[in-house]
Amino acid sequence: MRIAGLPLLGLALLALGPLAACSAASPQPAGWEPIPGAKSGWTTGTGASTQIYLYAKRSFGGTLQDLASQETINVLLRYHGARLLRSEPFGPCPGAAGVATFTLEGARILERGFSVQNGQAVEVSYLRPAAAPPDAAAAAAMKGALCAAPL
């Protein structure tokens, strides 16, 4: 299966490739298709309308604030021309998670959600065209990943 816009998909997968290798399965956005070769990545749409959702989990000994700083720096270093629009508490579970929103070249929006749960960083990347409103299925999957009750 060939996905139109492969260069952007490749960038997104490269950015989270090491993280995806360490992640556990998560619920995919309802109705989205798995990305071939990605353990925890899904896509919807074609061509300029392609949207990508990636999930990762890794060991992390810091606080939510530490993770927020790390996420912002990582995105700005990985994506040439990325600009931080805002970084704020994640609405469905403020205080437990955050989301940083970036503009990327090619009129794309990257929402990087993150939380710290039981000594692990949970990270979600949602890449979509800037002209597209957020997908409800991606928002629900992000809420499920970031707002999980501690075990």
Image (cartoon, grey):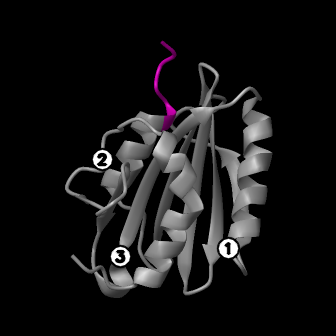
Q: Nearer the viewer, residue 7 or 146?
A: 7
Q: Earlier in the sequence, mark 2 or mark 1?
A: 2
Nearer mark to the viewer, of 1 and 3: 1
Instruction: Name which residue type carries label 2.
Output: Gln
- Whether residues under marks 1 and 3 lie with C-beta atoms below 8 angstroms apart, the answer is no
Could you say which quadrant of the image residue 106 lies in?
Answer: bottom right
Instruction: Give the SS element for disc 3.
Output: loop
Which quarter of the rendered picture does the N terminus lie within? bottom left
Q: Decide: few, some or many residues near mark 2? Use Cα within 10 Å; few <14, some 14-19, many ≥20.
A: many
Residue at 36%, 49% in the rendered image: 39
Position of 69 relative to 59 (above/below): below
Residue 126 belongs to magenta span: no
Position of 18 relative to 105 (above/below): above
Q: Position of residue 53 (x, y in %)?
A: 41, 58
Q: Please state if 37 lies on the left or on the right of 64 as rendered.
A: left
Instruction: Give the SS element for disc 2.
Output: loop
Instruction: Name which residue type carries label 3.
Output: Thr
Instruction: Name which residue type carries label 1.
Output: Tyr
| Alpha carbon distance from label 3 to label 2 | 16 Å
Q: Magenta span covers which residues?
A: 146-151
Q: Nearer the viewer, residue 92 or 137?
A: 137
Q: Position of residue 37 (x, y in %)?
A: 33, 60
Q: Position of residue 24 (x, y in %)?
A: 41, 35
- Whether residue 129 is visible, yes or no, is no
Label at residue 50:
3
Instruction: Give the SS element for disc 1.
Output: loop
Residue 149 belongs to magenta span: yes
Label at residue 28:
2
Instruction: Check disc 1 and report the residue beneath it.
Output: 79
Residue at 52%, 57% in the rendered image: 17
